[in-house]
Image: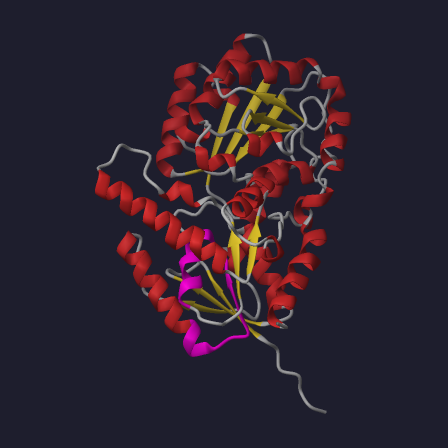
Amino acid sequence: MTEVTMKHCVVITRFARTQPGFLDFAYRIAALAKHYRVSLVSDHPLNVSEMAIAGVQHHVLAGGESQLGWFRYLWNAARFVRKQRPDCVVLLHTLAAPLTHMLGKIPTALYWNEHAIRLKSTAPTGLVKRLYQDWRHRTLFIDAARRADLLMPIGEAHYADLIAQGCRPERTRLIYMGVDERFRGVSLARSRQQDDPLELIYTGTVQKARGRDVMLEAMAMAVKAGVKVHLTMVGASPEELEYCNAYARQLGVGDAVTMHGRVSGHEIPAFIAQADAGICIWEDQPWWRFNPPTKLFEYLVAGLPVLASNICTHTEYIRHGHNGLIFEYDSNSLAQAIQVLWERRAELAAFKQRAFASSTPYLWENIEPVFLQTIEKLTCK
């Protein structure tokens, strides 16, 4: 009997050294590894449990964290692909988009996971630098996206923007990030007495622009108003751990806030399982108006109602009073949302069930077949 040779797929990544989460990328690599011979390319070793995927060959190419290092890595990645001559290439990050200019006729899919405008400086700059930034944005990202054989934006806002920028609808497929079985309904089994403290969870990068101080100050206001509440934050760097613990003590809520550093994505469901609601909070920056956060979908799949700041990438998925509560990006508004949740704590079980019921489109088991069928069509062209 003739042995069937698996098609070869090269996956190109471009992760920051401080990348907080890998699960949505890992889901895709693991799915591809079931059907393809996968070569995974990065510019530094990916020594995280999420990327320990059976059967995947990992190649580390020279690059660097600077802009020059980014260009060097792209050049080396293009050389690697041309040498391998795979059946398809999956560019698994917006930052890998410029490679569509360099890969010739090799079928190429581009995972559009963040808006390229984030890479443009928002600080005042001189004319020459601004013209360079505009050229870089247009040529290395927008024109590159138009050249991809398949574009995979992660949310509705990304999809609409890419079409508005001239990307062809027949080559553009909205595919959500996805959440796997580890998260399914884990918070629904949590038992609580009526007057137990309200347990809130925040997972992900801890930074000022991501609502760090707003959350801590809101906790102080809620506690002062008589709300029994506790907040667990997971994902802080050592510097942020020190800052948040000190600021919580200064605000008088040291006992009401528990900080954790960065953990494997596989550990997150255990934290979420102990919560009554999850917090999604972003400063209203242009690039975050396109990127739905991973945590939002993980909360919903787990069965957590979401306290979400008023930005379209939250309100696209959270209906106020149904599967979460929407608040303005300030500590007073968040404190009021916490108080409302506390006052309605008798309804928490129903609130959780509605959150869970709204999560079906975001389950990876429903998304994976669509992702694989889309890639297979690419390789059969």
**Residue 96 inside the magenta-drawn segment:** yes
- Quick one: which residue is furthest to the top in this view? 225
Q: How many numbered discs, if any? A: 0
Residue 244's image quarter? top left
Residue 291 x %, y %: 52, 40
Q: Quadrant of the N terminus?
A: bottom right
Q: Is residue 112 above or below residue 43?
A: above
Residue 366 x %, y %: 72, 52
User: Which residue is rendered at x = 21% and y = 37% of the image?
Assistant: 126
**Residue 85 inside the magenta-drawn segment:** yes
In the rendered view, how is the structure colored? secondary structure
Residue 274's image quarter? top right
Point out the stretch of residues depicted in magenta: 81-102
Left or right relative to 197: residue 22: left
Q: Quadrant of the C terminus?
A: bottom right
Residue 194's image quarter? top right
Residue 373 x %, y %: 68, 63
- Quick one: which residue is furthest to the bottom in this view? 1
Front residue of this view, candidates 14 and 171 = 171
Q: Is residue 343 above or below residue 176?
A: above
Is residue 141 shown to the viewer in this render? Answer: yes
Residue 238 x %, y %: 37, 38
Q: Is residue 155 above or below residue 375?
A: above
Left or right relative to 357: residue 9: left
Front residue of this view, candidates 328 and 146 = 146
User: Which residue is rendered at x = 44% and y = 14% of the image?
Assistant: 252
Left or right relative to 218: residue 31: right
Is residue 14 shown to the viewer in this render? Answer: no
